[in-house]
């Protein structure tokens, strides 16, 4: 047995192992950390724990940094002898000092960044310039290591001849771009992937952030843990479609983590691969899963799963309720073929603790974790054949 297979079996291979894993993670992510809203040191600690745990079995897992807010203060400028270049700014880059700097433009051999701007006072590169594929300036969205990297200006093709003249002359330019952003503390999604036979993807989502003054155990850390259990369970398989497990932040504050990841996939040119989006939120309000989708084939699949597993639960089916809610909403238009389903739950009185200090680890019904895991594992298995 491989090391990965052994780790997967040890973590989630049996009901007893899953119960131990769930209990351990509730302790580590809720009781030990406490409230963990996005943009805080506590949330940073949570994402570090999740990423390190997924790395035990997944070949690919990473922290996906994003910003809850980013904007430029009008207006960004590159000037030569009073002539202002027509420039935009790549979203999520850092800014220059408020007073700007004087520099010279140089050519680069760097993917995506055609030119650099060297600060004459320091001799170091202090900004970059990307060139759009169009005549005018096109939007550019930065992600990964480029978030809050050097100031990045964007020009259209029409400005390239003039910039080339400035390069050849080593002409001095005045550069200024003021940026405001939040939060200061790194905020991340956690992404894990099980590569399948096809690049087509099933995206499995749950958020890990809480509101202030609450551990957010039922909403939604317990569900994030169930999603981690699913990732470990599939880590040793070769699914027909690639499985991407997305643990988001900032769901409680405008779904900014999911919005960022959707934009990242568009910027990467990989959004077309998404075929199914399964979003889960608050799976421990009771054993009776609340299933929302207007996709009758997906709804029928879940109904067959419930019947075949023979679980003593009473699912709530909502064929009139769109699945594109909360974190899933931002993926509705990822491409023309994407299909969605949303899972929630009912049955116990834990809903009353929602968004309050009472939503702690002690208030999580443990049986819901195993029920949700079994159903979702089977759903993911069967979606491979659609």
Image (cartoon, rainbow, N blue to C red):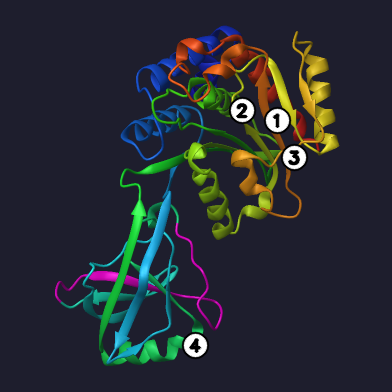
State the extent of the magenta-drawn residues as a range: 121-142
Q: CA distance from mark 4 to mark 1?
A: 49 Å
Identify which residue, 268 or 84, lies in the foreground: 84
**Residues marked 2 and 1 touching at CB (< 8 Å):** yes
According to the picture, the residue beneath numbered tag 4 turns out to be: 158
Question: For the residues marked 3 and 1, what is the alpha-carbon distance in whole angstroms?
Answer: 19 Å
* Nearest-to-viewer mark from 2 and 4: 4
Comes first in the chain, label 4 or label 1: 4
Q: Earlier in the sequence, mark 4 or mark 3?
A: 4
Horizontal side of 14 relative to 250 (left or right) equals right
The residue pinned by badge 3 equals 322
Identity of the residue drawn at 70% across and 30% down: 380
Do callouts 4 and 3 mark residues in contact (Cβ within 8 Å)? no
Comparing 329 with 54, the one in front is 329
For label 1, the residue is 380
Q: Earlier in the sequence, mark 3 or mark 1?
A: 3
Gap in angstroms between the C-alphas marked 3 and 2: 27 Å
């Amino acid at each position: 047995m491989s090391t990965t297979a052994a780790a997967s079996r040890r973590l989630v291979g049996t009901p007893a192992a899953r119960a131990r894993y769930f209990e351990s993670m509730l302790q580590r992510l809720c009781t030990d950390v406490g409230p963990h809203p996005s943009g805080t040191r506590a949330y940073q600690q949570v994402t570090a724990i999740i990423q390190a745990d997924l790395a035990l079995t997944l070949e690919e897992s990473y922290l996906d940094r994003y910003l809850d807010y980013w904007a430029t203060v009008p207006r960004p400028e590159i000037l030569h002898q009073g002539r202002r270049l027509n420039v935009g700014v790549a979203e999520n880059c850092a800014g220059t000092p408020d007073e700007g700097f004087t520099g010279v433009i140089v050519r680069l051999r760097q993917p995506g960044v055609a030119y650099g701007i060297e600060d004459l006072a320091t001799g170091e590169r202090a900004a970059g310039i990307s060139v759009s594929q169009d005549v005018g300036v096109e939007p550019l969205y930065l992600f990964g290591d480029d978030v809050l990297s050097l100031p990045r200006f964007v020009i259209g093709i029409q400005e390239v001849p003039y910039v080339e003249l400035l390069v050849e002359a080593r002409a001095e330019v005045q550069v200024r771009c003021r940026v405001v952003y939040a939060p200061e503390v790194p905020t991340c999604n956690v992404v894990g992937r099980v590569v399948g036979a096809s690049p087509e993807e099933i995206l499995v989502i749950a958020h890990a952030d809480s509101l202030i003054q609450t551990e957010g155990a039922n909403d939604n850390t317990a569900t994030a843990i169930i999603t981690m259990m699913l990732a470990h369970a599939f880590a040793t398989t070769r699914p027909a479609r690639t499985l991407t497990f997305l643990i988001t932040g900032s769901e409680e504050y405008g779904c900014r983590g999911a919005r960022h990841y959707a934009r990242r996939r568009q910027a990467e040119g990989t959004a077309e691969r998404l075929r199914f989006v399964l979003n889960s939120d608050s799976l421990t309000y009771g054993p009776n899963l609340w299933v929302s989708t207007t996709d009758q084939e997906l709804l029928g699949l879940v109904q067959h799963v419930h019947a075949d597993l023979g679980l003593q639960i009473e699912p709530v089916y909502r064929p009139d309720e769109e699945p594109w809610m909360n974190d899933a909403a931002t993926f509705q238009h990822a491409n023309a073929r994407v299909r969605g389903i949303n899972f929630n739950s009912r049955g116990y009185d834990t809903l009353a603790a929602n968004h309050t200090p009472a939503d702690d680890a002690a208030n999580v019904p443990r049986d819901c974790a195993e029920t949700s895991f079994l159903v979702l594992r089977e759903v993911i298995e069967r979606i491979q054949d659609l």
